[in-house]
Image: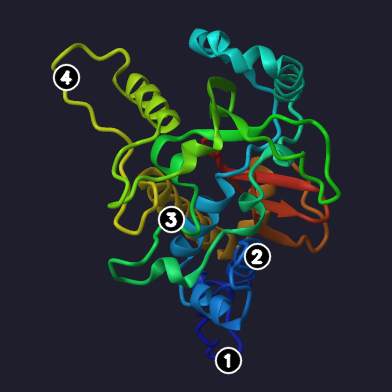
Amino acid sequence: MKRPNNGGQASSMDIDPFESKRVNNFRDYLIKGIPKFPNNSETISELEKLSISGLLLYFFTWAYRFVPPRKRLVSVEYEVIKDKRWKTYSKEIGLLLGKVEEGEDLSAHLSLKAHKKGFTPRATQLGAEVDKWEDKDFLLTTMGYHHFHLSNELMENGATVRTDDVLFSRVTRDTFEVVGIFNHSVFERNTKESPELNAERKKLFRKFDEHTFRGHPPGTVVSGPMITTSGHALHVSEMASNYAYVLIEAEKELLSNDGVGKLYAKHGIMEPNKPRLSWVIHGLDLGLFCNKSKSLFVYRYGPI
């Protein structure tokens, strides 16, 4: 929640960087960007109470579901090629991987939940019956795997036709590693009533174990991805905290005498008349965008 300004005239050196106009606009930018359910004033109010790092945590947890468009090197694990579904979907997979190599937008192939579910207050509550994963991608958060629908036929909503079988991959800024093809039963979590993993889920967990322990000698203690008690990936939580720190430190410099001018000079760009700088998240990168020069000053690069 924004704190009220104290009013009166103040020099840039007197402005609290946490309460600068740029930072408050950035808070609004994050809150507006996160898909909310239910999308009402109560949900928005819950987001407004969060710190910058808290907002970034929810924003990144949602935005991580997407794959920023950039050219990537494709690799396919041999076991995937042996799967009979590889041949069944050979044309569709070829088109999808072609998009990856050309750096095209893959959003149409993602789950519809990626576009609609980013934050719900229900998932933040305490209690044994609370589903912490209601607004998160469980497999992406715990294993780091994105999944993509294989059809290339678009529906009216802009998404591709849904396929029961989906392609799983590990994505970095430079690579796209295909790790398997699974049907939708892979998303069915085991319960107290049905504690056994189904066949597809067992296959996925085995694949994840292989990736986790790969390259480590027998007897080595290896820790998989850490998850916080709130259900967020620890590395995403740390990223949010780091970005918040970087943003506030940068804001202190920008508010100092000729801080903005020094920014342009540092990058060899002529400072335009009355530039308007805005903090933005581009993919998962943190940057300052100048509306006059159309420049993006990147302060942190994201992991994908």
Tell me the residue at 76%/46% (across/down). 295
Q: Looking at the image, is mark 4 or mark 2 earlier in the sequence?
A: 2
Q: Which secondary structure, mark 1?
A: loop
Q: Looking at the image, is mark 1 or mark 2 earlier in the sequence?
A: 1
Q: Nearer the viewer, mark 1 or mark 2?
A: 2
Front position in the image: 205 or 73: 205
Q: Which residue is mark 1?
A: 7
Q: Amino acid at mark 2?
A: Tyr
Q: Which residue is mark 3?
A: 133
Question: Looking at the image, is 216 positioned above or below residue 112?
Answer: above
Q: Amino acid at mark 4?
A: Thr
Q: Amino acid at mark 3?
A: Trp
Q: Would residue 266 be visible to someone looking at this image? A: yes
Structural distance between the alpha carbons of marks 2 and 3: 24 Å
Q: Are marks 1 and 2 in contact (CB under 8 Å)?
A: no
Structural distance between the alpha carbons of marks 3 and 4: 31 Å
Q: Which secondary structure, mark 3?
A: loop
Q: Amino acid at mark 1?
A: Gly
Q: Which residue is mark 2?
A: 29
Q: Nearer the viewer, mark 3 or mark 4?
A: 3
Q: Which secondary structure, mark 2?
A: helix
Q: Which residue is mark 4?
A: 220
Query: Which quarter shows the C terminus?
Result: top right
